[in-house]
Image (cartoon, rainbow, N blue to C red):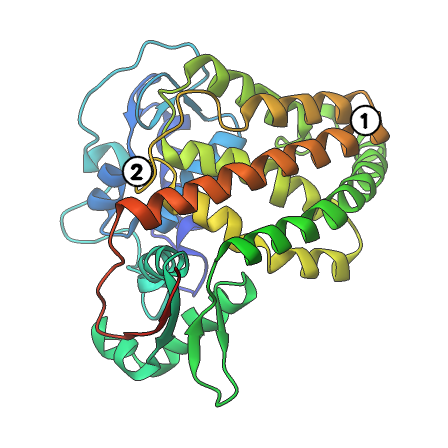
Amino acid sequence: MKKISSKPGPIYAEISHLLRRAIKSGLIEKGLVLIEGHVAELLGATRTPVRQALSALKSEGLISRFDGRGYTAGPAGLTPLRRELEASMLGITAARKPVRKLTGWQAIYETVERDVVHLSVFGDYRINEVELARHYSVGRMAARDVLLRLERLGITEKDERSRWRVTPLNDNRIEQLYELRWLLEPAALASAMTASTATKIQSQLQTSPEKVGSKDSKSMMANLRKAIHSYPKVDRQALDELENDLHVDYLAQCPNKELLQSLERTRCLLTLGKHVLGKSAPMPPLDPFLAEHLAIFKAIDQQDSLKAQDLLRTHLEKSSRKVLLRAAHVRENFSNPKLSYIELVKKLI
């Protein structure tokens, strides 16, 4: 068996390579159900790189969502085969683990992000960087890296004495962040539409159609239609991916990087939805945003920039009200996480 390079590189890329090869060679049978947790356990990895790898393979069309948990190998519409994924299907021997475990900040990021964004709806908290490192048995540099990454998303910040704190997500801040998104996202969308059209034309001139990027607005629309058909039997990870398709991935085509950096600090709203929707707050009985996203992508597909921008503004106005209700539900029905590295400064009333 050919060994994976030992040179440093993205762990998710190694996992993608293993799964891709197994699917293409037939070691993983078409229709076999692939579940994030099972794959992570088999590979000796954490869920984050496995999630990234599965998302990449889905974009390549090698795996598909279905009306259940996880993915199926192959195209959509196949009968799910619920058999245990075995090491032999990936060419793994007992003598060697095929991937490296996450270390440093990567190993703790998802957990800290979840806990800190959850705390943000309860009040003002101080974060002890040394205690954070001790709590997770990592170096102080790893703890600082996590906090810096959360700072870029508007989840943490430093006070006047350079101490880390959780940036509270009270109602006033939620409204202000949505106002910022309402002003900036439509402009980013219009710019992204122009850039996307130019890129498609250039790609079609330089390469064959099947090699043009697979995750374009049409594939995003297809994913939304599948989710609408399956709702509410859609897992939280899928909803998070669908949120990011529009508000992160599509807008990333906007060439104005200053505008995108301004929007990055509003990502705490998406992160709140990612960790709270269906966990602390119940899954809404009606589609939370899917139909609205689909309408926006239809306008994008029709090259109707003004309509797409208007639909996006309306969508953001509705989302603001939903997030305010969701945050209130969490405050009223759940207790804040008790963590050794957190100190309450002021509780939201």
Taking the image as drawn, is residue 15 in sight?
A: no
Q: At x 73% / y 29%, what residue is drawn?
A: 311
Mark 2 lies on a secondary structure that is: helix
Disc 1 to disc 2, C-alpha distance: 38 Å
- Check the image and report above or below for 326 versus 49: above
| Residue pointed to by mark 2 | 36
Along the viewing direction, whichever of 345 and 88 lies nearer the viewer:
345
**Which image quarter holds the C terminus?**
bottom left
Q: Label 2 neighbourhood size at 10 Å, few (<14), some (14-19), many (20+)? A: many
Q: At x 33% / y 16%, what residue is drawn?
A: 31
In the image, what residue type sits under mark 1?
Lys
**Which image quarter holds the N terminus?**
top left
Along the viewing direction, whichever of 115 and 23 lies nearer the viewer:
115
Residue 94 percent coordinates (x, y): 13, 48
- Check the image and report above or below for 4 versus 329: below
- Check the image and report above or below for 258 versus 61: below
| Residue pointed to by mark 1 | 307
